[in-house]
């Protein structure tokens, strides 16, 4: 067993989007990604999400996976497969705001291969404010994931009342 494979025993699971079959019976050869934050990650083809347009500010990065550190649940991370040290903390958008229902364009839905909003998972990128050390979610730039097509897209809600810095955990 090689050194990277020995160090693979990680507490971070990579989320699978397989549409059948058992997780242990994966097809394809996994990629081995090394990240300072998560260590070695074994990423199978059914765990890779394609973002045809990248993310805002990271348009050159097109393939991502979702890493779920057990100790940080429900927080997960959108990790760039080509540069695994680029990782965005994410939460389901509805856990940030229960009645979150953004108006998504047909272009956004078509990019991920969806006909309606019910086919996509909406995620929010989170950040800690350096001035207050509080956790915020960007509800103006939701991440759309179609689990069936494994395609993703970051929508930009220009004319929206949703916040770029929605405070989480406030009563």
Image (spheres, helix red, strand yellow):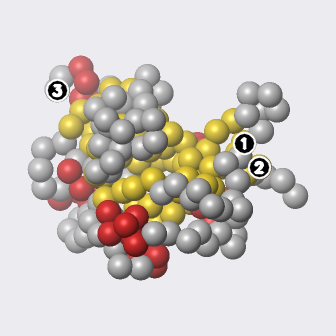
Q: Left or right: where does residue 112 sit relative to residue 70?
A: left
**In the rendered image, which quarter is residue 91 located in?**
bottom right
Whether 15 is drawn above or below 134: the answer is below
Image quarter of the N terminus: top left
Q: Kindly report which numbered mark, 1 or 3, lies closer to the viewer in this rendering.
A: 1
- The spot of residue 62 in percent (x, y) is 30, 43
**In this orientation, does residue 95 appear?**
no
| Residue annotated with mark 2 | 167
Q: Secondary structure at mark 3?
A: loop
Which residue is depicted at the point 73% across and 34% down? 129
Crowd tier of the residue under label 2, counting other residues whose Cα lies within 10 Å: few below 14, some 14–19, many 20 or above: some
| Residue annotated with mark 1 | 135
In the displayed orientation, state which residue is furthest to the right: 171
Which of the two residues, 50 or 106, is positioned nearer the viewer here? Answer: 106
Asked if the residue under mark 2 is in contact with the one under mark 1, i.e. CB atoms within 8 Å, the reply is: yes
Cα distance between the residues tagged 1 and 2:
6 Å
Which residue is depicted at the point 22% across and 48% down? 44
| Mark seen at residue 1 | 3
- The spot of residue 19 in percent (x, y) is 25, 70
Of labels 3 and 2, earlier in sequence is 3
Q: Kindly report which numbered mark, 3 or 2, lies closer to the viewer in this rendering.
A: 2
- The spot of residue 94 in percent (x, y) is 62, 66
Which of the two residues, 46 or 121, is positioned nearer the viewer here? Answer: 121
Which of the two residues, 4 or 59, is positioned nearer the viewer here? Answer: 59
Q: Secondary structure at mark 2?
A: strand
**In this orientation, does residue 42 appear?**
yes
Which residue is depicted at the point 50% across and 39% down? 88
- The spot of residue 168 in percent (x, y) is 75, 51
Q: Secondary structure at mark 1?
A: strand
């Amino acid at each position: 067993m090689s050194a990277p494979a020995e160090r693979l025993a990680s507490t971070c699971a990579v989320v699978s989007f397989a549409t059948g079959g058992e997780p242990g019976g994966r097809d394809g050869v996994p990629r081995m990604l090394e990240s300072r934050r998560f260590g070695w990650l074994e990423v199978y083809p059914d765990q890779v999400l394609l973002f045809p347009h990248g993310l805002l500010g990271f348009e050159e990065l097109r393939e991502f996976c979702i890493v779920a550190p057990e100790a940080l649940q429900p927080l997960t991370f959108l990790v760039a497969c080509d540069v695994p040290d680029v990782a965005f903390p994410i939460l389901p958008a509805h856990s940030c705001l229960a009645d979150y229902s953004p108006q998504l364009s047909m272009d956004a839905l078509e990019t991920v291969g969806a006909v309606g909003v019910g086919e996509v998972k909406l995620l929010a990128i989170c950040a800690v404010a350096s001035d207050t050390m509080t956790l915020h979610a960007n509800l103006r730039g939701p991440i759309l994931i179609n689990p069936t097509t494994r395609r993703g897209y970051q929508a930009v809600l220009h004319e929206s009342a949703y916040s770029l810095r929605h405070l989480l955990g406030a009563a």
